[in-house]
Amino acid sequence: MSENRIYMASPTMHGDEQRFVKEAFETNWIAPLGPNVNGFEKELAEYIKTGSAAALSSGTAAIHLALILLGVGEGDIVFCSDLTFSATVNPVTYVGAKQIFIDSERDSFNMSPKALKKAFEVYGAPKAVIVANLYGTPAKLDVIRNICDEYHTPLIEDAAESLGAVYEGRQTGTFGDIGVFSFNGNKIITTSGGGMLVSDNEEYVNRARFLSTQARENERFYQHKEIGYNYRMSNILAGVGRGQLLYLDEHIVLKKKIYDRYQEAFADIEAIEMNPVPANCKANYWLSCMTIKKDSNVTPLDIILELEKHNIESRHIWKPMHMQPVFADFPFVMEDGVMNRANVADNVIDMSVSRDVFSRGLCLPSDIKNTDEDMEKIIGIIRKCFR
Ligand SMILES: *Cc1c(COP(=O)(O)O)cnc(C)c1O
């Protein structure tokens, strides 16, 4: 990490991680599996109050396995959040299925239940739905769950960014048939790289463990009846995760303080709005984001470049999947209409919520190690852009 740079989100270690890793070294549990993997799975499942969990090499691997567990394959359709990181939707392509992207709602920037309903009406039931909880704010998970149930469609909840966030009293990651977390370096807790697949259905979790360790049958020789993957988390990294999990609550408190600080500091600037957090949920505030009102002459890029001059990291909001060149031919469903490649060619104006949020939004430095002076500096630079 470069000195003096102010980050959006970087790893914050506490020392307890080393205790678990040291134990692994001392007992020579270096190779995959071992007490840290079992411990991390159990402790995370207890924290979010779910049945069981499988520790994996990444969140992306967890989404890939979730699709396989739900039988998604060649030619199937999957409805996916549009405004998200590409890792939410790439695994759909890995299994030979096709994405249909669902626009966001204004309330949370997450998948619009109305647009989702519309997609069911237009296309019928897909093989699965993947909903992401952006920047640590839960989607309308109960409403989305109910729509999926109505059509007997399984739900994958991509909670990679929302570990510890709560929707109507219940932890995110537990609303889907399968939930997914990530412990990538920038996430609210990290194992440097890693992921978790969770479910109340123990069969799913057991099968995820099986598939993630090369689908080895229980025989004395190497016997394979299925194609497997090398997706298991190592015992060393699970040790880091166990140490980090002890500090998840503390991280959330600090993240919220950052969000509150920005909100207060920009309260008098009419053109700035912070990312919305609906009243019926507790976000984990992984990243604080702001949008700039339409009539302002300041753009997100102006602010990003100004911060960069001072060695401060910030980014645009995720660029929506329906705007990505790689998905140019894929359908996209909004609350009041469907857009596909043909429409784009016909110069239909894209009035989607996700495009609007992307064009006006940016993610602010949200690193919990940032000092009061750092926050002061960031806020000062941004305020100056609006003078
Ligand atoms: C980080 C992230 C992932 C992928 O997790 P990895 O562990 O990096 O593979 C998936 N979805 C979302 C929304 C993410 O932010």
Image (cartoon, rainbow, N blue to C red):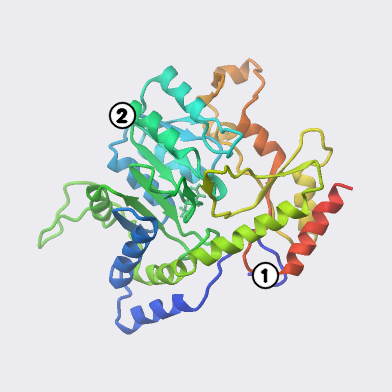
Q: What residue type is labelled 2?
A: His
Instruction: Locate residue 342: give its quadrant.
Output: top right
Query: Of 91 and 156, which appears nearest the observer?
Result: 156
Tell me the element at label 2. loop
- Image location of residue 41, percent across then percent down: 33, 62
Give the image location of residue 380, x and y in percent. Answer: 82, 58
Which quadrant is the N terminus positioned in? bottom right
| 150 lies above or below 358 | above
Question: Can you give x and y, in whole percent of width and height, for residue 246 in the image?
Answer: 45, 70
Q: Which badge, 2 or 1, is on the more N-terminal residue?
A: 1
Horizontal placement of 380 versus 168: left or right?
A: right
> Residue tagged by mark 2?
152
User: How many discs mark residues in the rendered view?
Assistant: 2
The answer, for residue 9, to whether it is visible in the render is no
Residue 116 drawn at (x, y percent)? 47, 27
Name the residue that disc number 1 marks: 2
| Mark 1: secondary structure | loop
Left or right placement of residue 273 versus residue 12 in this view: right
Q: Report the side of 149 relative to 271 (left or right).
A: left
Question: Looking at the picture, does residue 234 appear above or below residue 98?
Answer: below
Quadrant position of residue 253: bottom right
Q: Within 10 Å of the Cα at label 2, are there few (<14), some (14-19), or many (20+) other Cα atoms?
A: few
Residue 4 vs residue 32: left or right? right
Q: What residue type is labelled 1?
A: Ser
Would residue 297 be visible to someone looking at this image? yes
| Depicted 28 relative to depicted 133: above or below | below
